[in-house]
Amino acid sequence: MRKILGILAALIAVLGVIWLVLQRKDESQRVTAAPPENPAPLQQAGSTFTYNFDGDGVGLLPKKFHSARTGQGPSSQWVVLADSTAPSKPNVVAQTSVDTTDYRFPLLIADEGSFRDLEVTVRFKAVSGDMDQAGGLAFRLKDANNYYIARANARKVTTGSLRWWLEGAAPWEERIWR
């Protein structure tokens, strides 16, 4: 009888440890509530905006923008940088944090306008990144956890490992404007 009670006590202890581990894992993957965005003013049809960051101070967050983050990890770091290879010289905006949190998507949000219909052109260059190398546009943004995204990412998972890939094109190269 003592042996059975000992086995039951050990089983209960093991189940308790498993429950604690699963509980912590669940908490680390939980999406936290994001504060709602203040809606940018709705622009009339035919309005045009061009952002080239040339009038913004190098090393600073660009004017008329703010940052946010989807997921976990520290806040994103966006700054204006000089880049002699930029299609619109001299300045670009760059996400410079090197955090390796797995579920983390830094956002740079324009404060100037919202649109019912939109035609947009953007260029980006992947410079580095161990977790991700991507660029894109978020639209119909309600908050940092609720938006649509059009994004380019050159990673492919093959037999459980990430590989660089851009479907139908040459292998992905860093430091090239797309």
Image (spheres, rainbow, N blue to C red):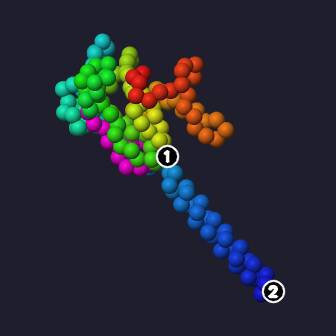
Marks counted in the figure total: 2
Viewer-closest of 64 and 135: 135
- Residue under the point 64% across and 41% down: 160
Res 111 visible? no
Q: Position of residue 143 (x, y in %)?
A: 38, 38
Residue type, mark 1 in image = Asp
Q: Position of residue 100 (x, y in %)?
A: 45, 47
Question: What are the residue bounds of the magenta stretch?
Answer: 69-80
Secondary structure of the residue carrying numbered label 2: loop
Res 46 visible? yes
- Residue under the point 39% across and 39% down: 106
Q: Which residue is mark 1?
A: 102
- Residue under the point 56% across and 28% down: 165
- Residue under the point 32% across and 25% down: 114
Quadrant holding the N terminus: bottom right
Residue 91 vs 37, above or below: the answer is above
Q: Position of residue 139 (x, y in %)?
A: 40, 28
Secondary structure of the residue carrying numbered label 1: loop
Q: Position of residue 178 (x, y in %)?
A: 42, 21
Front position among marks 1 and 2: 1
